[in-house]
Amino acid sequence: MSNRIFAATLVVLAFVVPGARADDTTWTRTFFTGQASLPARVRCSGTDVYVAGSATQPSTMSAYLLKYDVNGDLEWFLDIEFYLYNLAVGLAVGPDSNPVIGLDIGYTAARAALIKVSSSGDTLWTRTWDLAAVEALAIDQNNNVYVAGTRGASIQDSLWIAKLTGDGAMVWSRTYRLAGAHTVNGAGVNSAGELYVPMLLIESAEWPEVAKFSSAGDTLWRKKYGGVTRHFGIAVEPAGSFFLVSNSSAKKLNGDGSQQWSASVPSGTLGQDAAIDDAGNGYVCFNDNSQDFKVRRYAAANGAVQWTKRCVLPTQDLPLSVAADAQRQAVVAGMGIDGSVMRNLTVRFTSSPGVAEPEEPGRAPDGWIALHQDVGPVRRLSGTVPGAGTYRLRVYDGTGRTVVRDRAVNLESGPFCIPLPALAGGVYFASLCGPAGSGSGRFVVID
């Protein structure tokens, strides 16, 4: 019998427990693999939560896609590697509940990829383009996929938009030459298939602009909204009105770009995103001097602040993306920074009315899941848990398929050691959930 080794280079994951007040959050989860785990986008389908991000290694970068259920349990993950460089840059989920992830896979030249995945974690199709960058995605009510990014030799001087069917067939592709270098900061689509693309014009400063395109890809209008910003996000309602967030303001606008209302934005660092729920309420994520995840909701009718919520953890937290689920609960993804370690942090907030800020920061109990390097026929998962009880173990292979499903293990508080079955060589991911929280980590079995 050949020996197998659990490679311990990608092994440590914070054991996660809720660190905010119970009436602020319903759950808090981290994901960590490699040297750093960097989230790109969070999106919801019903009450399911999808998070796309990238993990850095000493000489490579891999992308990942996670799915959490309404309780914060990890249903599956995908580890995505085309080449040495795989940067997740966009994510969207359609009415069919199947997510689409956009990737930058160009190591020495611009190259883009699009992957559609089923709600159970199976890859449905993949598309790639040379000399292109996918920077944002949107999906309409018919599951058509819209791409916004840049393409061509002078890549930042052009805007590239494309429409694909839900099966991945190209409907149309358009490239527009722009005056000056731009970056694309999001995308949204209404029920008529009209595409909205926010851009930042890089001059001596960065000026926000929105372009709207017809269902055939023709330009309907382009408007600048003034004010220097480096944080910009958009969310579009089916009827065509949209929510626009920048450093200077949060705005609700009509489909022709005219303003319904404008409200102030919080001080501090804004996330690179915006969200809108089925009632038309707008959401923005941010942090301030407290270095905590915060989310604010604006009323659909007039932009009044309905509530501001906070998640308090012992790390320095930087929110990047926000979504609203079918229960109008906000979900925020970003980085939890602990010294030189950066973890993907995802928080689901409650839908209850806003609460006062905690008087003292909460603290998550110490606890770690670490994969034990083991040689020979005995294979085990070891680490420590901060509380006793019955835990549920899942192990996934490199495609995201479950190879150990909901195995119940009774653990005491403190160190643990769980035997694992014989596994073929490859990349695996272990998830452990129980009464004191959840944790996960990636490992490699080498034949």
Image (spheres, rainbow, N blue to C red):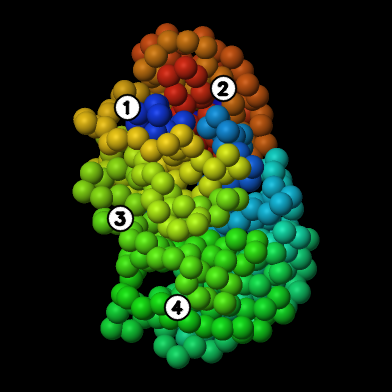
Question: What is the secondary structure assignment of the residue under circle 2?
Answer: strand
Per the model, the C-alpha gap separating discs 3 and 4 is 21 Å
Q: Are marks 2 and 4 in contact (CB under 8 Å)?
A: no
Precedes in sequence: disc 1 or disc 4: 4
- How many neighbours does mark 4 have within 10 angstroms: few (below 14), some (14-19), or many (20 or more)? some
Mark toward the start of the polypeptide (2 vs 3) = 3
How far apart are the alpha carbons under marks 1 and 4?
A: 41 Å
Amino acid type at image mark 1: Ala
Q: Residues within 10 Å of mark 2 (few under 14, many from 20)?
A: many
Q: Amino acid at mark 2?
A: Leu
Q: Is residue 68 above or below residue 169?
A: above
Residue ID at (59%, 14%): 408
Q: Quadrant of the C terminus?
A: top right
Check disc 4 and report the residue beneath it: 209
Residue 393 tag number: 2
| Mark 3, residue position | 266
Given the image, on which type of amino acid does mark 4 rest?
Answer: Glu
User: Mark 1 falls on what kind of element?
Assistant: loop
Q: CA distance from mark 2 to mark 1?
A: 21 Å
The residue located at (47%, 86%) in the rendering is 157
Pinpoint residue 77: horizontal percent, then vertical percent. 59, 41
Q: Are marks 2 and 3 in contact (CB under 8 Å)?
A: no
Residue beneath disc 1: 364
Name the amino acid, label 3: Pro
Q: CA distance from mark 3 to mark 1?
A: 26 Å
